[in-house]
Amino acid sequence: MKVSHHIRFLHKALIAAIGLLFCPSVAAAHLVTTGMGPVYDGIGHLLLTPEDLVPALAMALYAGLRGRAPGRRALFFFPFAWLLGGLLGLFANTMPIFPVTAFSFLLLGIFIASDLRLPDHAFTVLAAAVGILHGLLNGIALKAGPAGLGLLGIMSALFVLVAIVSAIVVSLKPPWTRIVVRVAGSWVAAMGLLMIGWFFRVQG
Amino acid sequence: MNFCIWFLILAVYLVWTPSAQAHVEQGQAVGFVTGLEHPWSGLDHVLAMIAVGLWGAQLGNPALWVLPVTFPMVMAMGAMMGLLGIPVQGIEIGIALSAILLGAMVLGEIRPKLYIAAILVGFFAIFHGHAHGTELPPGQSGLLYSMGFVIATGVLHGIGITIGTIHRWPAGKLALRGVGAFIAAMGVFFLWQAII
């Protein structure tokens, strides 16, 4: 009884969070200054950068689809890999030319849409790889601003995000609810394809 | 409990500090809204996408979700082809034919094998994606436009599926076939417009 009560609360919290994310605001791909310090700048960077937020949500959805154990693993591996990548990024100098984040969209989207049952170790590698990749890009971007503390903010926000979203997906019981998650995955994959297209359009 | 939740939402919203940007961003949020609006801007697209949902609802599981999953992914491939400059001939004719054939499938309550239905839907999705995916107004974010575009397409499928739930009643079945006939007839009109 108590558990279902918490799940209902999580459902409402997720709806509220989604509502807040769609509040009219500037979606900045560059540094966000909240005025509340570097940790909050990092949180703001994650929440207002769709290139990072969507793959993070997708990772959480996929972890939830895979079940409790992978969900727990993603909860720890993913944010820490992101932090590790970010720390490496603080020492890197150049941003990659190709939109590598498009591949996170594409890969995670396809995995979610197809409900692919990756072996445990492969899932862990995936979570770590996506985390390191996005963390690296964040580290390069945040170097001139909130730097390490900003990364800490991002990691904290990721931990909460993955915990809430994957827990909700794990709790989904009716088959149609898992289908909704898979449909969302197909949308993420479609966005990835379009990102690749836009990249070449701009380059051309 | 509900009061606490709403109070929490309100409190977070009120303390949500507006971003102080180093420079003024333009077109980002507009890009999302433009993408969201785009699939609704042409009746031919709207009817074809709703028809996908209707047909999926008629066919039931797993087509109910396989078709709406197939469509946006292949549509994005079509858009990517457009963005890469790969030409597709007869776009308008293809879109009109999609309305005719998908409407006819709903009208006849035709039940092909799942992969055939998915191939049919995917084939026409290329035309829809090629036509709409490339039309980003200058100064707007490609990613946010894509997000809005894909979400709006999904919503249109969802509307089709929701309407398609009337299929469970005998009168609903008939009404659904009537909607299919309407979509097919409109497709003929679009085809006539495309050819003339």
Image (cartoon, rainbow, N blue to C red):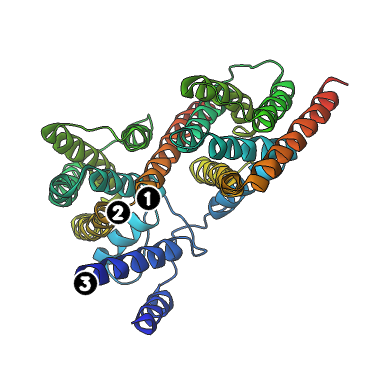
B117 or B150, which lies in front?
B117
Q: The residue under label 2 is which amino acid type?
A: Leu
Counting residues from the start of the chain, the first of labels 1 and 3 encountered is 3
Counting residues from the start of the chain, the first of labels 3 and 2 encountered is 3
Which secondary structure lies at badge 3? loop
Q: Is residue A72 left or right of residue A112?
A: left
Label 1, label 3: how far apart the Cα atoms are: 21 Å
Q: Residue at x 54, y 40 (%)?
A: B57
Determine which residue is flagged by label 1: A177
Q: Is residue B165 left or right of residue A74?
A: right
Q: Residues within 10 Å of mark 1 (few under 14, many from 20)?
A: few
Please give the chain letter of the residue carrying mark 2. Answer: A
Among the 4 quarters of the image, the one containing residue A171: bottom left
Q: Residue at x 54, y 22 (%)?
A: B112
Please give the chain letter of the residue carrying mark 1. Answer: A
On the question of residue B128 being in view, the answer is yes
In the image, residue A23 sits, relative to residue B44, either above or below, namely below
Residue A172 image label: 2
Q: The residue under label 3 is which amino acid type?
A: Met
Instruction: Say yes or no: labels 1 and 2 on the same chain.
Output: yes
Which secondary structure lies at badge 2? loop
Q: Position of residue B156 (x, y in %)?
A: 60, 45
Q: Residue at x 34, y 64 (%)?
A: A11
Q: Is residue A44 left or right of residue A136?
A: right
Q: Quadrant of the C terminus of chain B?
A: top right
Label 1, label 2: how far apart the Cα atoms are: 6 Å
Query: Given this view, does label 1 or label 3 mark the residue nearer the observer?
Result: 3
A112 or B19, which lies in front?
A112
B154 or B102, which lies in front?
B102
Q: The residue under label 1 is which amino acid type?
A: Thr
Q: Are marks 1 and 2 in contact (CB under 8 Å)?
A: yes
On the question of residue B42 being in view, the answer is no
